[in-house]
Image (cartoon, grey):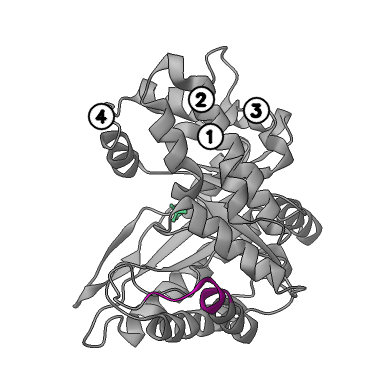
Amino acid sequence: MNIDELKSVARAIVAKQKGILAADESNPTIKKRFDSIKLESTEENRRRYRELLFTTDGIERYISGVILFDETLRQSSRDGTPFAKLLAGRGIIPGIKVDKGAKTLALYPADKVTEGLDGLRGRLAEYKQLGAKFAKWRAVIQIDEHDVPAAYALRANAHALARYAALCQEADIVPIVEPEVLMDGIHGIDRCEAVTSQMLGNLFTELNAHRVVFEGILLKPNMVIAGMKCTTQASVQQIAEGSIRCLSRYVPAAVPGIVFLSGGQSPEDATNHLNAMNAMGPHPWELSFSYGRALQAPVLAAWEGRENNITAAQRAFFKRCRLNSLAREGKYNRGMEAD
Ligand code: 13P
């Protein structure tokens, strides 16, 4: 394990004004996204779409890293340049999703555990060869009534995340550790804070037990937020304060950065919430973004799969990158959406 390399990659990913584009949708997930614009999810359409994102002019000012899916890491741009090389050439660090998805936890029908540890050491060695310098593993925690999630499901997911993180660090790949408490459901913000706290508590205990070096990881959590179907939605300030309170209690200062997922928030809300948290700073860790939908939803809507719309789609992407970069510094306001 090369600790200096791990630390320097982790710090570069959360460099000031920069964040991550999560473009690692698995094939079933990207199919859902393409369905929304009535585009067939063929390998070539997926390649064209990722090329549109990765070749957008000027995004390297705001985007430090891109998370890729296995298929995308093996694809190339129209002119034959492998995507990992294209990104690295622009100063953007390529990363790779390595988990194999969340499956029902045996004997806990309402809970999930993420799979993908078997053979991971070998896959990480290959991904490193292909140019990946960081990785992602996502645990999925669903909140429901009647003791869901079960305490044991949180422990099982924390254990898997820690085993993944240790394997990454052994291979000199920075692990992004993602325990996502879903915002689906009717629960209020307090329940989200309680479950997020419990999950983070378990997670850092397991990471420590697995000898994971905190300076060489990034945490990708949900924000503390009410369920999408909750009748009482929290204010921007409540979300920012709840998230910071929870993270301050459970995330060691040695962790260089926290890169939030957007989780189904609108692009504007995700930017606004990140901005409010940074405006409350300074914090012990960099607070940045690793957004999928919140960066891409307007891009897909503008593109619709058409060559003629590529310029408009890239403009939409650049705008979201720029606004989230401002939110990294607490300098965003909603009025900027009209620019
Ligand atoms: P969203 O920002 O769309 O939640 O995606 C981020 C991600 O990578 C989830 O694993």
Q: Name the residue under label 1.
A: 316
Q: Dot 4: what SS?
A: loop
Disc on the earlier residue, 4 or 2: 4
Q: How far apart are marks 1 and 4 (CA)?
A: 19 Å
Q: How far apart are marks 1 and 2 (CA)?
A: 6 Å
Mark 4 neighbour class, 10 Å CA radius: few under 14, some 14 to 19, many 20 or more = few
The location of residue 55, given as percent across then percent down, is 60, 25
Comparing 144 with 309, the one in front is 309
Quarter of the picture holding the N terminus: bottom right
Mark 1: which amino acid? Ala
User: Magenta stretch mostly in which secondary structure?
Assistant: helix
The mark lying in front, picked from 1 and 4, is 1
Q: What stretch is highlighted in magenta?
A: 233-240
Comparing 168 with 15, the one in front is 15
Q: In this view, does 164 lie to the left or right of 46?
A: right
Q: Name the residue under label 3.
A: 85
Q: Which mark is residue 38?
A: 4
1 and 2 marks in contact (CB < 8 Å): yes
Mark 3: which amino acid? Lys
Residue 75 in magenta stretch: no
4 and 2 marks in contact (CB < 8 Å): no
Q: Mark 2 points at which residue?
A: 312
